[in-house]
Amino acid sequence: MRFLFYSHDGLGLGHTRRNLAIASALTALEPRASVLLAVGADYVSRHRLPPRVDILKLPGLRKITNGHYSARHLCIPVEEIRGLRAAMLLTAVKSFAPAVALVDKHPFGAGGEFRDGLRVLKELGGKAVLGLRDILDEPARVLEEWRPYHMQQRIADFYDAILVYGHRAVFDPLAAYEFPESVESRTHFCGYVANLENPEDVDEVNGTIPPREHRTRPLVLATAGGGEDGYVLLENFIRAAATAPWQGLVVAGPMAPEGQSHALKRLAAEHRVAFLTFVQHLSGLFGSVDALVCMGGYNTVGEAVSKGVPVVCVPRVEPRAAPQHERRGQRDEHVEGAFERGGAST
């Protein structure tokens, strides 16, 4: 059985990491399944893929503001990058002929780039499934963005199933985002999606830090996910770690701008803070550090809570807020607190 998983990847790694986790679980459960991941994130090429999973690498998009994008690498207008990505997605549907397409978050792709591909999928008898993290943004903001496109009704008319990556008791997107009643019977609350690391990968990543018995101070890890907009958080963390009674470890992220990554590396060396640009299977470290500082992204918070590590969140404010830390985290004793990004300082 063939599956096509789509994520636009305009900002951060969350969409791809979530689809990769689902693909890994799916192929483990169903030995006849093959999954093609259509992704824009460059970092996937560094990842060890599960069996029977492969990548269709789309030219990269960069999210500027909500609903507005530019080409990440190519010097071409956004209309051309969208056309190129749309053509690749359409060809993938025609050639690969998936039985199911799983679309992460954007119902018809960024800027509608997957609209034609999804139409052909249905014409060929395939099923369309929409995967949504439980909290997309503040409800008023989501409703404002969706209203001009009648998005709730279009989802109801088009999709065979909706998967919500969360628990309804924590947050109910069907009510908050005003979905029509007809959607409810096709909606499945799946719980929180977290990457399950291979024990060998956990051992490998833990080789990058000193074991607990050799530490003289608690070890605190700071990560900004992909790292594209994490400079302020990580800079403040390094300065705070310089005089703290704990040892700091910074992972900048594979999407951190090169100049910012170099600046953080110099600052970390000056203040004797451990610094890494990228760690594959980073969540494998969460169970081995004494605390975690992060930006409150879906994957990071879910994986940290599953490991029981104390967490401090400094959430993203733009282009899309990270309110999930408030509702998901308030129900877990390990989430120590969350701070407004603008008020962060050493």
Image (cartoon, grey):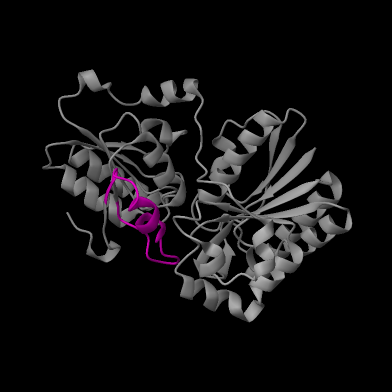
Which residue corresponds to the image point at 11% horizontal and 37% vertical from the top-left?
Answer: 245
Q: Which residue lies at the image location 26% right of the left edge and 59% below the top edge?
A: 339
Left or right placement of residue 87 versus residue 146 in this view: right
The residue at the far bottom in this view is 148
Residue 313 lies, in percent from the top left, at: 31, 52
Image quadrant holding the C terminus, namely bottom left
Using the image as rendered, state which of residue 8 and residue 129 is in the foreground.
Answer: 129
* Quarter of the image with the N terminus in it: top right
Quarter location, residue 158: bottom right
Near-viewer residue (267 or 153): 153
Along the horizontal axis of the image, is 256 left or right of 150?
A: left
Q: Which residues are magenta?
A: 313-336
User: Measured from the top left, where is residue 316 in percent x and y?
Assistant: 37, 60
Residue 254 lies, in percent from the top left, at: 45, 44
Viewed as shown, does residue 231 lie left or right of 226?
A: left
Residue 123 belongs to magenta span: no
**Residue at the extreme right:** 124
165 left or right, relative to 271? right
Position of 79 relative to 245 (above/below): below
**Image point 63% across, 64% down: which residue?**
110
Q: Residue at x 37, y 65 (%)?
A: 317
Q: Main secondary structure of the magenta part?
A: loop
